[in-house]
Structures are given as C-alpha cells and as structure tokens.
Image (tube, rainbow, N blue to C red):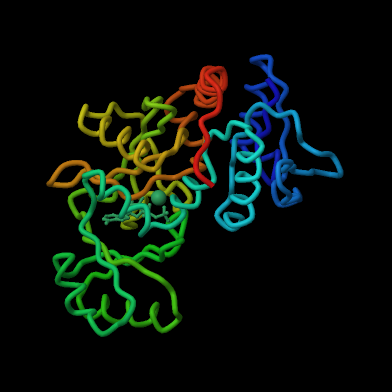
C-alpha cells in the first residue's frame, strides 16, 4: 500500500518508527510535511499538492499533527478525506481532541468517568465554580495545553481565585477540575489501536511534581490494566472516534477517570516501556481497515 505519515519532521522518534516499520511490512511509506502541502478547493476534484507533486495515489494517511499545527493540519487531513483516502484519525476527531472542554463534553455524553469539571466565561461566578469541583486543592487547565504546560495545581481557595482571574484577564480559556489527590502523581496511558488497548504504562511524576507527563520528568513502568480501566479506555477512544489514541486515566476513589484522549500519542515512551511494537499494530490496523474500504467522517 502507499501510505503517508503526515509529520513536520521525519527524524522524530514516532515518525521514524512509522516509516521504518511500514517499509518493513512491504508498504511504500513517505513522510509528508503537512505544513508545506497546498490544496485546491474545486468541485469534484480535490487534490493535495506537496513539493509541486499532486498526491493522488495514496491508500492511507497517518496524521501526526502537532498542537501548533492543528488548524492547517486538520484542513490537509480533511482534503485527503474528500479524496477518499483512509485517514487513521479523521480531521474532525483530531480537532475535537485538541479542545479539552469539547472532549470532556463528548466523553460525558457517553457516560465515561471524568474528574468533576467546571467551565465559565466570566469571573463573576468563580466562587460557585470552585465549590462545584469540591473546593481547593483543585486543578486549572488551559483548554489547549499539552505536555503538562498550562496545567496548574492551586492548593488553596485564594490561590485558585487569583490564578483563575489572571488567566481570564489574559483572555485564556480554562477549565477548573477536581484534583484527584489519591492518584498521587500517577496516571495511566492506555494506547488504543482500533478497538484494542495494545499497550499500557503507568507514569509517575518526578519528586513533588503532580503532573506525570514524561516531558515534565515523569518516569514510566509497564502495567496491566484492570478490566474496568481497559473498557474505559476503549469506550473513550470510540466516543472520540479516534482509531489511534493515547487515553490518559487517573485512578480515583470513584473508579477510573479519563483526563484526556490524545490523537497523536508518542511512540517512544510506550514502546520503550512496554516492549510492544506499537507502530506495527498501527499498520496491522490500516491493512485490515483499508481492505474494508473507507468509511468517511463528515466534513
Ligand atoms: P496535558 O494535555 O498538558 O498533558 P493533562 O490534562 O493530561 O494535560 O494533565 C497533565 C498531567 O497533570 C496529567 O498527566 C496528570 O498527571 C496531572 N493531572 C491533570 N489533571 C489532574 C487532576 N484533575 N487530578 C490530578 N492530577 C491531574
Ligand atoms: Mg496529558
């Protein structure tokens, strides 16, 4: 099959793995920098052009859209979808996953366990918002942060009030969330491909840090999920309509709660921690799905 990995840099670990493993499996795989693609929006004949070359004969694309390239990256993925190319993750699913509030609303609709979360536009109701999430300590998040940047733990009600006011003063969109203290700086990353959790790891925050992101110095170990955690991860991925995703779960007193579902989950941490060839699982999924034909997402 002819497959493109949509990524800005072929040297990134995840991109490099996908290129290598895909080729090993006999596919023609290339890295396409979606930020350098351009497109024509004409009736009946949508095309994506890269380095002067129309990309007309691809069977599938694996989007690896970075947080800062979401808007344009999703437009490129959408164009491929219009062309009938199988996108491992569709443009709509990717853009939904980038908005933490929208994601939580989708997950809530499916009855998936979530930390109690509040959201408001004005600072008039801060007091109520804080009460709603069971008071301080609580977590404040920028709606579009990633890698732990923009996630703040406010230990006291006073700190919470000033951080919320400061963010709102900067016109930043934030959500306020119950702090799951019992998780003790640990979270679970479940890597879901199709309808299966193919690998899972536990991440422990560094020292007295509460964010367990590997980018924030967290360390990872392989774990086996409970059946409830496994089904939560699969349901979350399905609700978001993502075929490849990293579902982040906290172990709370009221069962597993989903924090977020990532649409371009990194391969380095999960493959090195678990020894699972995750890149191969992604290609196995493409091989079976592309045979069945493309089911288009709505544009
Ligand atoms: P990002 O998209 O930046 O990774 P997350 O929502 O995943 O943002 O939060 C980053 C980390 O902060 C999580 O991996 C987790 O360790 C910690 N964290 C986030 N929300 C909570 C919460 N409500 N309670 C406890 N810890 C949390
Ligand atoms: Mg995260």
Report whether 273 appears left or right of 22.
left
Report whether 234 appears left or right of 277.
left
Quarter of the image with the N terminus is top right
Camera-nearest residue between 218 and 54: 54
Q: Is residue 163 visible?
A: no
Check the image and name the residue furthest to the right. Answer: 52
Residue 237: % across, % down: 37, 37
- What's the residue at 35%, 43% (across, down)? 248
- What's the residue at 33%, 82% (across, down)? 165
Q: Is residue 93 visible?
A: yes
Residue 254: % across, % down: 13, 46
- Is residue 256 shown above or below 126? above
- What's the residue at 39%, 38% (across, down)? 220
- Is residue 295 shown above or below 137? above
Residue 62: % across, % down: 60, 35
- What's the residue at 63%, 32% (across, down)? 85
Q: Quadrant of residue 137?
A: bottom left
- Is residue 44 shown above or below 156? above
Report whether 291 appears left or right of 177.
right
Report whether 181 appears left or right of 10.
left
- Is residue 44 shown above or below 259? above
Camera-nearest residue between 203 and 92: 92
Camera-nearest residue between 276 and 248: 248
């Amino acid at each position: 099959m002819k497959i493109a990995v949509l990524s800005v840099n072929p040297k990134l670990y995840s991109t490099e793995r996908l290129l290598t493993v895909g080729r090993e499996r006999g596919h023609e795989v290339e890295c396409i920098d979606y930020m350098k693609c351009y497109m024509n929006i004409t009736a009946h004949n949508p095309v994506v052009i890269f380095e002067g070359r129309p990309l007309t004969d691809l069977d599938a694309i694996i989007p690896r859209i970075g947080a800062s390239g979401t808007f344009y990256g999703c437009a490129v993925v959408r164009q491929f979808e219009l062309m009938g190319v199988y996108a491992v993750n569709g443009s709509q699913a990717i853009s939904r996953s980038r908005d933490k509030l929208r994601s939580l609303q989708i997950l809530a609709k499916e009855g998936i366990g979530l930390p109690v979360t509040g959201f408001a536009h004005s600072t008039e109701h801060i007091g109520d918002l804080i009460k709603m999430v069971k008071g301080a300590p609580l977590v404040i998040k920028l709606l579009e942060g990633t890698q732990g940047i923009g996630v703040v733990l406010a230990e006291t009600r006073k700190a919470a009030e000033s951080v919320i006011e400061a963010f709102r003063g900067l016109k930043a969109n934030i959500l306020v969330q119950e702090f799951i203290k019992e998780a003790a700086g640990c979270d679970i990353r479940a890597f879901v491909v199709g309808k299966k959790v193919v690998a899972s790891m536990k991440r422990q925050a560094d020292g007295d840090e509460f964010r367990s992101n590997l980018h924030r110095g967290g360390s990872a170990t392989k774990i086996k999920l409970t059946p409830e955690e496994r089904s939560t991860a699969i349901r979350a991925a399905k609700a978001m309509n993502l075929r490849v995703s990293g579902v982040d779960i906290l172990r709370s007193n009221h069962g597993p709660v989903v924090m977020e579902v990532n649409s371009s989950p990194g391969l380095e941490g999960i493959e090195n921690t678990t020894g699972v060839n995750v890149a191969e699982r992604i290609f196995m999924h493409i091989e079976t799905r592309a045979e069945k034909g493309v089911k288009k997402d709505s544009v």
